[in-house]
Amino acid sequence: MEKGTPLSTTRIYLIGLPGSGKSTLGKELAANLNILFVDLDAEIEKETGKKIAAIFKDHGEFFFRQRESEHLRKWASSTEAFVMATGGGTPAYFDNMELINGSGKSIFLDVPASEIVRRIRSTELSERPLLDHRHQDELKDQIELMRSRRINFYRQAHTVLLGEGITLEKITEQLNF
């Protein structure tokens, strides 16, 4: 397949912990494939008119997870070709991982906790509600705890890419494009 050729029914879901590169690599991959990029968190923010942190604060995590699952279902049943950056917890709630695997190709970006901490330290933690209010020294422990709770879902992905240096080339190689 040539760069920029649209894939009429392609749905690629990038899953992994916060800071694993889902959004960054997702944008690159979508541009490379000439298909739509969808950031699931941004879709929820657009619908509610609130940032994710405000949704968690005002309505709680369960409300957020319901909205997340609804948006995931909408996209999974659409006729659009897309690359989606899911939220870090998306695969671990409801039947989301089954839906992801049944409607497209899932790729788990398995980045070490130490690298995720390095990346996250340069972002605004207040925008990450499950990591906000953590002392910098607690971030690695929190990331490892999240990973331990979600790993059984993440490992159900069609493809697992491991390491600090996951690139667009590594992803497209796995997709056989």
Image (cartoon, rainbow, N blue to C red):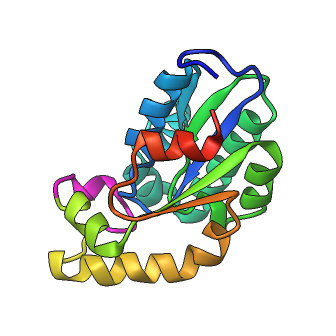
Q: Which quadrant of the rendered structure holds the N terminus?
A: top right
Is 79 displayed left or right of 27 in the figure?
right
How many numbered discs sit on the rendered protein? 0
Residue 136 lies in quadrant: bottom left
What residue is rendered at 58% in x and 76% in y?
151
User: In the depicted view, which residue is nearer to us: 99 or 129?
Assistant: 99
What residue is rendered at 34% in x and 74% in y?
113
Q: Which quadrant of the rendered structure holds the C terminus?
A: top right
Residue 35 lies in quadrant: top right
> Does 90 appear above or below 114?
above
Residue 159 position within the rendered picture, expressed as x and y whole percent measured from the top left? 64, 57
> Does 3 appear above or below 66?
above
Residue 118 position within the rendered picture, expressed as x and y whole percent measured from the top left? 20, 64
What residue is rendered at 52% in x and 53% in y?
87
Residue 82, magenta (yes or no): no
User: In the depicted view, which residue is nearer to us: 147 or 33?
Assistant: 33
Residue 129, magenta (yes or no): yes
Is 67 displayed left or right of 16 in the figure?
right
Q: From which residue to which does the magenta span run?
A: 122-131
Magenta-drawn stretch, dominant element (helix, strand or loop): loop
User: In the depicted view, which residue is nearer to us: 131 or 26?
Assistant: 26
Residue 120 lies in quadrant: bottom left
Residue 140 position within the rendered picture, expressed as x and y whole percent measured from the top left? 28, 79
Regarding residue 175, the answer to whether it shows in the image is yes
Residue 124 position within the rendered picture, expressed as x and y whole percent measured from the top left? 21, 53
